[in-house]
Each structure stands twice: as C-alpha cells, then as structure tokens.
Amino acid sequence: MGQACLDHLLRVAPLSGPAHRRGPKPSRRLRPRAFRDEDAPALMAGCGQPGTRRAKGKEAGGAWRRTPRGRGGSPSAACEGFFVDKDAASNNEALRGLCGQGKVYEAANLVEVMGRVGQVPDLSCCVNLVRGLANANLTDKAARVLRVAVMSGGVPDIITYNKLVGSLCRNARLPAAVSLLDDMAPSGCPPDVITYNTLLRAMFDRGMPDEAVCFWRDQLRRGCPPLLIPFTLLVELTCASLGSDCALRVIDAMALEGCHPDIVTYNALLNALCRKGGGLPPAAERVVRHLLARGLEPSAVTYNTLLHALCGGGGGRWAAADELIAVMRASPSSPPTVVTYNILINSLCRFGLLGRAIELLDQMVRDGCAPDMVTYNTVLGTMCKEGLLAEAAQILRFMRARGFPLVLITYNILIDALARKGDVAAAMALFDDMVRDGIAPDDITYGSMVAVLCRGDMPERAAEMLRLMSDGGCRIRATTFTLVVRGLCRAGNLDLAIDVLAMMTTAGCRPNPGVYASLLHGVAASGLPREAAKLRRRLVEYQVFR
C-alpha cells in the first residue's frame, strides 16, 4: 500500500455520521458492512466458503446436509419430531448423552431443534460444542450453536468466543469474525486483547494493513477502551508492513482518538526496526525523537535495543555504544543492567576483542552490577577459543570460591577446550569436580571425555565412559562409538571392541563399513588371521562387505 493511501486513511474525520464513511475505499476482501453493528447477525447466515472441499455430511450452501440414516447419522425428520415433542429437561438429558458419546453433529442439530421450539439448551454442552466445531473449522455450525445459546439467555465465556473468532480468521472469513466481535459486548462477554490481536494479525497476514488501522480506529470510536497491547501490536505490524514512518503516523492518529502510546509501544517499534539486522537503522533516531517529544523517558529496554543494533551488523560501532552506556550511567531511572553489559561483552567477544571485553567486565563490577552466568560463560568461551585455558581455569576457580552457582554449560566449555588440546589429566580432574558439585554430565560432556581419552591412548577408560552414557540414557553418536572401537583395535583389545560394537548395535546405531574394517585389521594384526577371515565371511553374509 502506498504512502498516499495511508495518508488518506489517517485523515481526521468528524466523529458524527456512519463509521464506514470516514475511511478510504476499502478492499473488496473486507467490505465496509463488516464494520457495522447492524450487520452483526450476518455471521449466522451460514454463508458458504468458496474454494473449499466439503466432505459428505458437512456444510454446503449454508445448510447442514444430513448423513445417511442409520448408526451415527444425523437425526432424520422423524427424529427431530421426536425431540420436538419432548420437554426441555428430556432434550437436555439427550443432549448431554450425545456430547458424552462424542456425537457432535447430532448434538449440534439437537441444539438447533431446541432453539426452534423455544427451549433452553444446556450452556456447558453448547460451549463444548462451539469449541469443538471451531477447532474442526466448522464455523457455520459453531456459529449457529452459539447463537442459540446466546438467544436462550446464556453467556458463553471469552475462551469460546476467541476460539470461534480464531477459526473464522483461519478460514479467511474476516467480515464474519468482525461481526461476531460486535456481538460479543451485547451478549455480556466483551472482547479482550486476544480477540483484538487475533483479528489484527489476520488482517495483516492477508495484506490488509489499511483495513486493520480503520478497524482499530472504529473500535475506539465505538467506545472500546484504549487497550495498549492491541495498539502496540498494530504499530509493530504497521512498521513491518509499511515502514516506521507510517507506524509513527498511526501513533499520532490514534492519539487523537484517545489511545496514547507508552514506552512499551515505542520499544516494540524499535525492536521491529532493529531486529532486521544490518546495524542501527536511521529510522531509529526518528522514533527516539518522537517518544521524547511526547514526554516519555527511554527505559533500559529502549537503550538495550539500540545498543544491540549498534553492536550488530558488519562491524560494531564501539564509540557510539560507549556514548550510549555513558548516557545510561547518567540516567537515574535507566542505569545499565546486566543485560546491557552482556550485549556489549558478547559483541566484543564475537569480534575477537577479548581485552576490551575483560575491561568492560571489570567496569561492570566497579559499577555495582553483578555479572551473571551468561557474562562468565561468554568470556570463558572466548578465552578457550583463544587458547587461554589457564586464565579460563582461574576464572572458574574464582567463581567457585565466591560461591557462584556453576552450571553444566560452564564445565562443558572448559572440558571441550581441554579435550581439543589433549590435556587428559586436566580434563579428568575437571570432570571429577563437576560430578562432586552435583552436576550430571550430558552427552556433550561424555563426548568430549571419550575424545580426549582416545587421544590419550586410554580407550578402555573411554569404553567405561560409553557404559556410563548408556546407563544414564545419554544419546551416543555413531562417531563416538567408531572412535572407541578403532582405539581398542589399535590397542589390541578386540574382546572389548566387540562388546562396544554390540553396544552400538543395541543403541540403534548401524556401524559403517569403516568400523568393521578397523575391527578386521585389529584381529589380523593380533596374529589371528583365521579368526579375521571367519569374521570377514560373517560380515559378507550380513551384507556389510561384498
């Protein structure tokens, strides 16, 4: 939609006169009559859904087609006459029985019969029927049951209405969904934020941003409370669809209708702008000026969103990030938080600026902001990548001495780094510390330990690790099994290699021909050529080798 179209849409019109005359010429997909109160009963008219395949016994042309008579079929005319002759208590007992048996179609037909003869159906049965039919996308049938319940004096709950509104939106029946929303307040159940959010998302999903803005404006003019959650969603979706300038114009237009934004609205708009990547967009500055002009104060979330955009993209804008943090330090209401520091530390580490990250960590502590596990794990991971394992171990000891609660990922970072270096003793010591701290190893921990033990010519210990993994229900990769089998074959421990091979098969990992080749080579190298030949013939029988 072009800028001119939105300009015409947001033009302020007098509050008198029909609502549909104040907006632009709407799309054919959502007619003006969909927003009018007098057209609300159109939902119950049973309009068909073109382009959809109708199964036998389902809606066609607005009428419910009866299935063939017999077991499980819809009530015939004679059966309906039977229910007409019964009183309300008997029919409600039959209705509960049909619902209990899962005969949804028959129960819905019975509700319609009771509505025609002026009987009041059981409200709980009607609610369950509407929800079930809405979940099955049988919207016309659900709407007729809902109408009978409401006309009989019942007040369905908001969950039931929202389910039917959602089903109508999923089936591209937005006019009927809007009409149902208009019926909700007179029936004693006004719409909530979920109702409005569902409709707004459906309109944007179908490329109807102008209609969505018009819809929310009309709701405000009809007395809808200025709910901030749907309004914030409208602004965010407008930004994603038409751009930030149009979103700011929507904010100004809705403020004239009494719906004023708060800082959460602007934060959502900034997040929609900045999450596209590529650094801080120029439009973010205009959004910040707009919120300041309205007398709002940026929050920590506002600053963090801007900081994340500054540190992202192809290269970090470190000078601008430092200035932003300086502004936050000077702000009494929005000082830097642990999330603020984590954003900048993570970005510095990602660009290989470990020294600056450590300096910022020291500054963080001096400012009285305690680092959390994300902070330490980010620095530890970068240290391990840079090969600074001694320094990383020193930080780990510092964390343990200060009583900092260590978690699994912290140990996994260091154990993996030690395994890659081949430091078996240090990896085993850290693994033992981990178990003593009461932290259960996972498949990543065991995988790293198996790798370092195999590299250290300790395949027997690696096989023990495999058993621990199997007993603990950890997922074992086929490559881990292969590594241990080859290590055992090189060490001449063929019996244990065969046991590991059996464990591998039991775990559902089919060994590849390379594993069997290593095993055959190990058997032959052990001075057992006959056994090797016999094993090869067996593998040929299993179609492992040709």
Image (cartoon, rainbow, N blue to C red):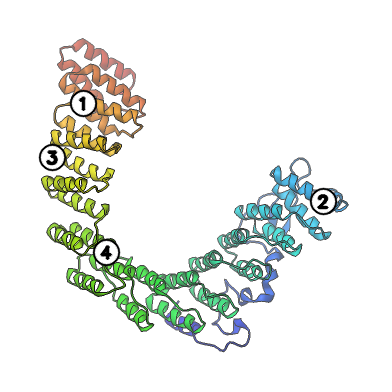
Q: Distance of mark 4 from mark 2, alpha carbons?
A: 65 Å
How far apart in space, not on screen, are marks 3 and 4 (Cα)? 33 Å
What residue is rendered at 35% in x and 68% in y? Answer: 271
SS at circle 4: helix
Q: Earlier in the sequence, mark 3 or mark 1?
A: 3
Residue 268: name its quadrant: bottom left
The amino acid pointed to by label 1 is Arg
How many other residues sit within 10 Å of disc 3, few (<14), some (14-19) or many (≥20)? Answer: some
Say which label, 2 or 3, has the lower sequence index: 2
Tell me what residue is drawn at x 14 percent, y 27 percent: 457
Q: Residues within 10 Å of mark 2 (few under 14, many from 20)?
A: few
* Along the line of sight, the residue nearer the viewer: 154 or 419: 154
Where disc 1 sits, the SS reads helix
The residue singled out by tag 3 in the image is 421
Q: Which mark is residue 461?
A: 1
- Considering every residue shown, the one lying at the far top of the view is 530
